Image: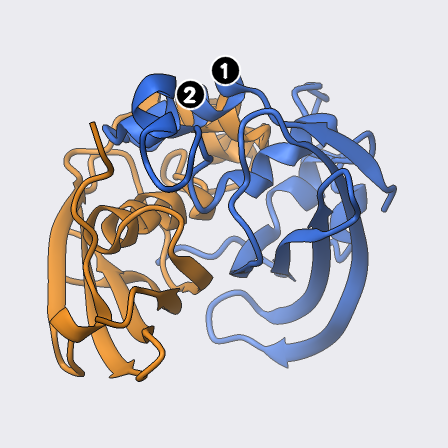
Chain colours: A blue, B orange
Amino acid sequence: MADHEFPVDRTAILTFAAALGETNPIYWDEAYAKATPLGGVIAPPTFGVASAHWNPSHALRGVRRIPSAPERPQARRSESAGDGASLTRVLHGEQRFVYHQPIRAGMRLRVAARPGRSWEKEGKRGGKLRFSETVTEYRDERGELVVTATSVGIVTEKAVEG
Amino acid sequence: MSAKPKLRAADLAAGRTHEAVLVENLSRTQIVMYAGASGDFNPIHHDEIFATQVAGYPSVFAHGMLSMGLTGRLLTDWLGDGVLREFGVRFVRQVWPGDTLRGKATVTSVGPDGRVVLEIVTSNQRGEPVIAGDAVAMLPAD
């Protein structure tokens, strides 16, 4: 899990807000945003995930790989989810953000992720489930925390539908 | 022009709820927009052949983070911009193309300092929860 940069620009915020169906001008109208107490364009609360574009080890970047059909349950680390079998068995279980300050257009963030806890559980629908936490810290140019994100990935033995 | 009127903590009390439709008839196009914006190109969310024939799902399904992002809009539209201090969810059930999502936030406590704690549930058109979680916001105290 490499530490990497995440420059935040207005276009990235705009496309992210648009994908959420946002109509709030705080995400793109600079004149409006400057007149608010926030003083400028900010990003929606879940925008931190878009740092994936800048993460050189992000397994789900837009590089299409030919999947191989899974012959048996695969339990792989989510960072190595680069093959078809694991792509189909890695679910996002939980996500939490702690906000220390808003993510603002123009910020040059540094992103550092580290593994958190991991545990196993017998699931009703997906067979044995492996949970693993990733804790990601976003810091501004001065090294101050902006967002702390905790993600829980679940690797399942079989497809879970429900 | 100014920010839209912000809620004050004094306007809220435990038990107060806010509900909104977050998306109607979710399109594959919106899922693809989210893939592009978020950088999560797991084909299970946009490639129908991969999702059905390789992964064994009935169709592509939305990123959990799309549902969380839509639920974030429920909070910011109601509480204001830049006031969230914490926002966490569990992804309970998948969201499929064609789903209509409705979010509901319930105030669980309001502190004298303006700290508001909320419970959140987003449900599909069958009333089944798709995500459940909580949030903390800091609002002007009075």
Q: What residue appears at the point 32 percent right and 36 percent down from the top-left corner? A: A36
A21 relative position to A144: left or right? left
Q: Nearer the viewer, residue B121 or A77?
A: B121
Residue A11 is marked as: 1
SS at circle 1: helix
Residue B80 locus on image (x, y percent): 27, 50
The picture places residue B96, in percent across and down from the top left corner, at 30, 41
Q: Nearer the viewer, residue A61 or B85?
A: B85
Above or below, A151 relative to A65:
below
Q: Amino acid at mark 2?
A: Leu
Q: A138 or B129, which is in the foreground?
A: A138
Cα gap from disc 1 to disc 2, whole angstroms: 5 Å
Asked if labels 2 and 1 touch by Cβ distance under 8 angstroms, the answer is yes
Badge 1, how many Cα within 10 Å: few under 14, some, many 20+?
A: few
What residue is drawn where x is 18% and y is 83%?
B14
Q: In the shown orientation, is residue A51 left or right of residue B75?
A: right
Q: Residue at x 20, y 65 (%)?
A: B8
Residue tagged by mark 2?
Answer: A14
At 28% from the left edge and 54% from the top edge, which residue is drawn? B75
In this rendering, position of residue A114 left or right of residue B73? right
Q: Which quarter of the rendered picture does the C terminus of chain B lie within? A: bottom left
Quick one: quadrant of the N terminus of chain B?
A: top left
Residue A145 in view = yes
Q: Is A9 drawn above or below residue B10 in the view shown?
A: above
- Can residue B126 be seen from the camera position used here? no
